[in-house]
Image (cartoon, rainbow, N blue to C red):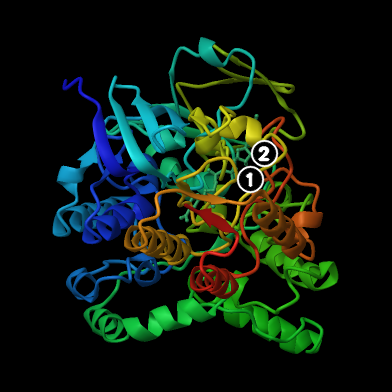
Amino acid sequence: MDNSVESLDALIIGAGVTGLYQLHALRKLGLNAKIYEAGSGVGGTWYWNRYPGARFDSESYTYGYEFSEELLQEWDWKEHFSGQPETERYLNYVADKFELRPHIQFHSKITAASYNAATNRWEVETDDGRAANAQFLIAAVGILSAHHMPDIAGIESFQGTSFHTSRWPKEPVDFSTKRVGIIGSGATAVQLIPEMAKMAGHLSVFQRSPNWCLPLRNGPITDEEQARIKGSYADIFKRCRETYAGFIHDADPRSAFDVNDTERRAFYEEIWAQPGFAKWHANFSDIMVDERANETYCEFIREKIRARVDDPEIANKLIPTDHAFGAKRVPLETNYYETYNRADVSLVDVREHPIKQITPQGIMTAAGHHELDVIIYATGFDAITGELTRMNVRGESGRTLEQAWSDGPTTYLTVMTPGFPNLFIANGAVFCNVPRCAEVVVEWIRDCLDHMQRNELHRIETTAEAAQRWTEDSDALTRDFLFDKADVKSWFMGTNIPGKARTFSLYAGGAPMFRDKCEHVATSNYEGFVLK
Ligand code: NAP
């Protein structure tokens, strides 16, 4: 390996959806930019999360990059909600088409990054022994990358195979004769469970909290649909720009109580029949803020679950009792509930009988021992901040991000935090269809660096006041929502991670308002930032 220190204009961390576009955008600007990526390939989330069943919850044609009309016309999405293998292929196609691969350092996980005030450069170390420095450090690490393993006694003692869903083996595993246990019932588990049920000798699902799951209604894209999609990308993206969460679905302006019971029921049936998140984002406008309105929808979903699960006792266990619809990220599912009608699938209620320990042979709950050959941890992520705080990033004063954010992250526009000059956080931490807001952030950073180059500016930092105001305003925006009222464990609030500060760290003002704020700051001479 080359022991020299690589010197760059911009070092981007992560070759996922955001990092790839950031690299392309900065190279077009003429900057010497490079990605450092922990994995052996591109894709980020779509590289790591290769569990069976992993697929978009966004319509495929709203998820792909908007920036290249040529790419939009060349790429044929095969399904309305693309599966992980196809999405990984897409991101590889993008990397090749835009000749990004020579500018990506694979197998290089950043283990430390510190800002050197004397040189105004970020100095970076990697787990494969590399060193690099760059004027700008851009963390495109995604919001769901730092996986979370639960703190269960005996976890190391298990003698079978075990892994977290985001560390799924690349080589095929034969589960056909195996007794498989899955811990968790979030969006990942809900995609995985129906697929694993088909593959495993026997599947046991260790569920602590059921979720409100909605039918995905995926299907292949026909040739006519393909032609229609390609002919209407401008409209599709215009629509995504106008909606609150960057999807093609937007809330019905009516309250759930503007209609009578029969009309409400008919409306719920109508959105229920639609694919994707229509059943969430195209719902009545007060579903996410009014508990009574929310309850009318919960009752509708309860009926749907009961109609699909043969055993009424199991159906009851699959119905949430601890949170309102939408108070946690809603999973989309395909045959999830029917899976529990299979004789070779068991639901283990670990709220009623908690997991006591992992043993060499399986899982011990308060009710007894479950012998297993495989344990799969679908136990989620230390979301939004986890990857950043685990990376040992030190700002100007020598404080780490972990220390600076011990009470929750303080950012300005989600892209910068005080005390960390020239560090851009390109997470797109917005309540949004990820690529739609990630593109906003990538282009904002590109334009900012362009502005700095043109004006011979070398250092940018947000002021503490601007960051405090933005963070307080963001907090205030979440207060009306049921996810902020609910006392539930969820990555939305950071409460799924023991000891983590309780904050809603996604900007909840809506994608259009986020874009407006970003534009406003750029056009008002980078108000809230100090540029030197
Ligand atoms: P998650 O929603 O945080 O779910 C983690 C699950 O593990 C929960 O059911 C949790 O139970 C359980 N768990 C954690 N520790 C446990 C313990 N000690 N004992 C028993 N159960 C335990 O994580 P996820 O399912 O990986 O999903 C995370 C996010 O990834 C999603 O919300 C979504 O945003 C994203 N995602 C997106 C897609 C997509 O777009 N297609 C697909 C999958 C995931 P409790 O709820 O009781 O804590």
* Residue type, mark 1 in image: Trp
Judging depth in this view, the residue of 10 and 326 nearest the camera is 10
Residue 481 located left or right of residue 13: right
Residue topped by disc 1: 491
Residue 410: numbered disc: none
Who's the residue at 81% across and 56% down the image? 485
Q: Is mark 2 within 8 Å of ligand 1?
A: yes
Q: Find numbered disc 2 in the image and state the secondary structure of the residue it sits on.
A: loop
Query: Up-down: is 49 above or below 155?
Result: below
Q: Find numbered disc 1 in the image and state the secondary structure of the residue it sits on.
A: loop
Judging depth in this view, the residue of 170 and 161 nearest the camera is 170
Instruction: Say which quadrant the N terminus sits in.
Output: top left
| Observer able to see residue 338 | no
Q: Quadrant of residue 284?
A: bottom right
Q: Is mark 1 within 8 Å of ligand 1?
A: yes
Judging depth in this view, the residue of 519 and 69 nearest the camera is 519
